[in-house]
Image (tube, rainbow, N blue to C red):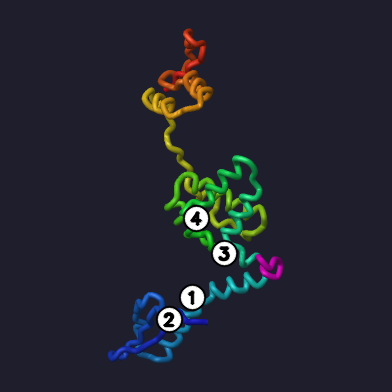
């Protein structure tokens, strides 16, 4: 296994370690070679132990389900879509294409950490939050996750945008672009403007909805 740190000694006699990934150097504050080596090995072991534990967990999980350690969020999304039909399936297929999910699409489930989800949520929209919850819960229900990636209380709240009725000008714009006579007549009968009461248009007996 590749070490995260390497050990070296400067001309002053002080031993240093250097991170092989970032290049960051840190003084061990000792000129004693034996003590420096103990500190050096302790640093590398501290870094390697989580990786070793993960490898051990993978070995046990693979024995129960050979595809467990290879399953990615791309697989979860694909199986989730298969459970839907009609318009629900169409919406799910569209949701899966959200670019925010590219951050975890090929991430193995067993290696997914909370910060991975948080990055997706920070980049995404309301629908991203909604569907990531669904994918996560689906994976849990299927037994593909040994534990939740994010606890329920740590999921950001979903805040929907304020909704409003269309304006008169917007309504006229919709009508001007509608060539279907029946649909145009229907839209003319369903004008949405300003107050929360039904008003009956006596001229054509079409109910007009007035909303705030």
How dense is the environment of label 4, judged by Cα within 10 Å: few (below 14), some, or many (20 and up)? many
- Mark 4 against mark 1, which lies toward the viewer? 4
Q: Position of residue 109 (x, y in %)?
A: 58, 62
Identify the magenta region. Answer: 61-67
- Mark 3 against mark 1, which lies toward the viewer? 3
Label 3, label 4: how far apart the Cα atoms are: 13 Å
Label 3, label 2: how far apart the Cα atoms are: 26 Å
Q: Is residue 151 above or below residue 55?
A: above
- Asked whether, in this view, residue 173 is left or right of residue 60, the answer is left
Point out the residue furthest to the right here: 64
Upstream in the sequence, badge 3 or badge 4? Answer: 4
Say which residue appears at 42% left-offset and 34% top-offset: 162
- Asked whether, in this view, residue 105 is left or right of residue 195, the answer is right
User: Image quadrant of residue 6?
Assistant: bottom left
Q: Is residue 120 above or below residue 28?
A: above
Q: Which residue is mark 1?
A: 47
Q: Is residue 146 above or below residue 11?
A: above
Q: Mark yes or no: residue 181 visible.
A: yes
Q: Are marks 1 and 2 in contact (CB under 8 Å)?
A: yes
- Mark 3 against mark 2, which lies toward the viewer? 3
Say which residue appears at 38% left-offset and 75% top-offset: 22
Front-lying residue, 197 or 168? 168
Upstream in the sequence, badge 4 or badge 2? Answer: 2
Q: Secondary structure at mark 2?
A: strand
Q: Which residue is mark 4?
A: 101
Q: Position of residue 61 (x, y in %)?
A: 66, 68
Q: Is residue 197 above or below residue 178?
A: above
Label 1, label 2: how far apart the Cα atoms are: 9 Å
Which numbered tag is attached to residue 156? none
Which numbered tag is attached to residue 108? 3
């Amino acid at each position: 296994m590749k070490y995260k740190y390497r050990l070296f000694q400067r001309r002053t006699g002080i031993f240093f370690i250097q991170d092989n990934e970032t290049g960051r150097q840190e003084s061990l504050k000792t000129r004693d070679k034996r003590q420096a080596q103990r500190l050096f090995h302790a640093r590398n072991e501290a870094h390697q132990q989580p990786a070793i534990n993960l490898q051990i967990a993978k070995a046990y999980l693979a024995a129960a389900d050979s595809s467990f350690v290879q399953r990615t969020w791309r697989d979860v999304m694909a199986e989730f879509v298969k459970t839907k039909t009609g318009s629900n399936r169409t919406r799910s297929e569209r949701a899966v294409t959200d670019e925010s999910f590219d951050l975890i699409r090929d991430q193995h489930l067993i290696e997914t950490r909370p910060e991975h989800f948080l990055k997706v949520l920070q980049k995404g929209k309301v629908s991203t939050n909604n569907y990531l919850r669904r994918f996560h819960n689906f994976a849990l229900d299927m037994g593909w996750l040994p534990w939740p990636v994010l606890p329920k209380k740590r999921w950001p709240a979903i805040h929907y945008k304020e909704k409003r009725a269309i304006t008169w000008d917007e309504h006229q714009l919709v009508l001007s672009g509608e060539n279907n006579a029946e649909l145009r007549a229907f839209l003319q009968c369903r004008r949405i403007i300003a107050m929360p009461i039904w008003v009956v248009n006596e001229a054509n007996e079409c109910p007009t909805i007035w909303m705030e």
